[in-house]
Amino acid sequence: MTAMTPLDAWTATRLGLPGKRLDRQILENYQLDKLSATVRFAVANSPFYRKHLGQSAAAGIRTLGDLTSLPFATATDLRSWGAQMLCVSQSRINRVVTLDTSGTLGEPKRLWFTADDQSLTVDFFQAGMSTLTRPGDRVLILLPGRRPGSVGDLLAQALARLGAASLPYGWVTDLAAAARFMRQSRADSVVGSPVQVLALARYTTGRVDLAEFPRTVLLSTDYAPGALIREVERLWGCRVFDHYGMTEMGLGGGVECEAHSGYHLREADLLFEVVDPNTGERQPDGCEGEVVFSTLTRRGMPLIRYRTGDLSRILPEPCACGSSLKRLDRLGGRLDSILRLPTDGTLRLSEIAEGVFAVPGTIDYTATVAVDGHRVKLAVSVLTLGGRSSMWETVEAELERIETVRNARAAGCLELRADSRECDDGVLPVSGKRLFRKVT
Ligand SMILES: [Zn+2]
């Protein structure tokens, strides 16, 4: 039998019903109250929302469906008007996170959190981590955690409440050093980004005794291809749980249960919608679209109908674990990671990722696109580990299995080139979220 996600009981407690089964009607009444309060609060305290939503916006929200009458907030709004979305004085801000500082996308995104906002994230992390950790476990954290309020720090606070020990490490740059740390610290669980955890799993296989591998893994911070998850599970003989979240959500958004069938959502703090990315119309459950969320409990910088750019769908059928919480399907990629081909087809970066990670020995990749008239040139560079330097033929063959790739190549409008190189001395390159790199 599949154990019910601990998020269910946690959400019931948040609704003031500890020990009771979570009731959807009560949850939705709570969400409506919180949503109306958030809109009122934002309009009263933020110049941006006053103008964006209008003075009387809260009066128009009588049902959760009325939310669709409100305009979306976008990443561009965040970049342009971030400071005006702030709803409390700077003195009440406990943490500011600056994202996308490369300058390639214009102004960076800034997000402001109060101590209470962060405390809610710790609560969510505590409930979410209890899916895969037990009291007494030792949890290796391969995420930044030095600064107070950083993701690693909040996770360590949550683990302390669970009675688990946290082993903060930070991003992995040197695989040998990280493997040594993992072995010496005897970690029961590992939390990290998908490509970094896969690289560590490949590196340690054959070097570390199987008994010393972690029992469970939580992947976070980036899209985790199914092929990568299966490979980590195979290499370490562990269970991998995937987490969905972004800084804008207050880091945590949803986490898989033991059924590994979509993310149970953090519905006490966030209200999720899925909309048609072109028309903005609400999509029925089961249909894919852009994930949009509204914060229900945030004070520093509430976000109302924030467009994430992520593609997914609400799973219509109940989860095998029996939870009443909504589930978001594994992501189908990002809107900015869809390549339109001259043959009318589209190719998603997530499809390329699945192909790349299906090849033994791969640990990371980049995909570069150049458009030359009616011809698209796609170059996929793969990083490998374990003496498998010349893998390009296998990678090409794997990508050729994607129907759109096959059709576009046959029609002569897609030029695909794969190359591969061995990761030198186990030193990982710095890599953020995976995107199509465009060259002209
Ligand atoms: Zn479940």
Image: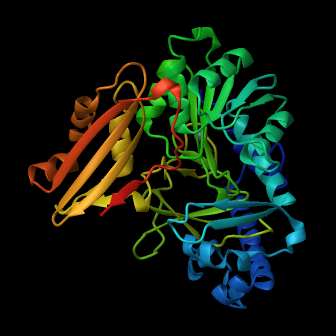
- The front one of 409 and 229 is 409
Pick out the residue farthest to the right. 91
Residue 57 placement: quadrant: bottom right
- The front one of 379 and 216 is 379
Image vertical order of residue 77 relative to residue 192, above or below = below
- The front one of 134 and 283 is 134
User: How far from the left and from the top, in percent, is residue 100?
Assistant: 58, 60
**Left or right: 389 as drawn, with respect to 375:** right
User: How far from the left and from the top, in percent, is residue 358?
Assistant: 35, 31
Image vertical order of residue 335 relative to residue 51, above or below = above
**Left or right: 283 as drawn, with respect to 263:** left
Q: Residue at x 75, y 47 (%)?
A: 124
Q: Residue at x 62, y 55 (%)?
A: 246
User: How far from the left and from the top, in percent, is residue 321?
Assistant: 60, 37
Q: Is residue 157 visible?
A: yes
Residue 363 placement: quadrant: top left
Image vertical order of residue 54 relative to residue 291, above or below = below
Q: Residue at x 51, y 21 (%)?
A: 203
- Image quadrant holding the C terminus, namely bottom left
User: How far from the left and from the top, in percent, is residue 215?
Assistant: 63, 20
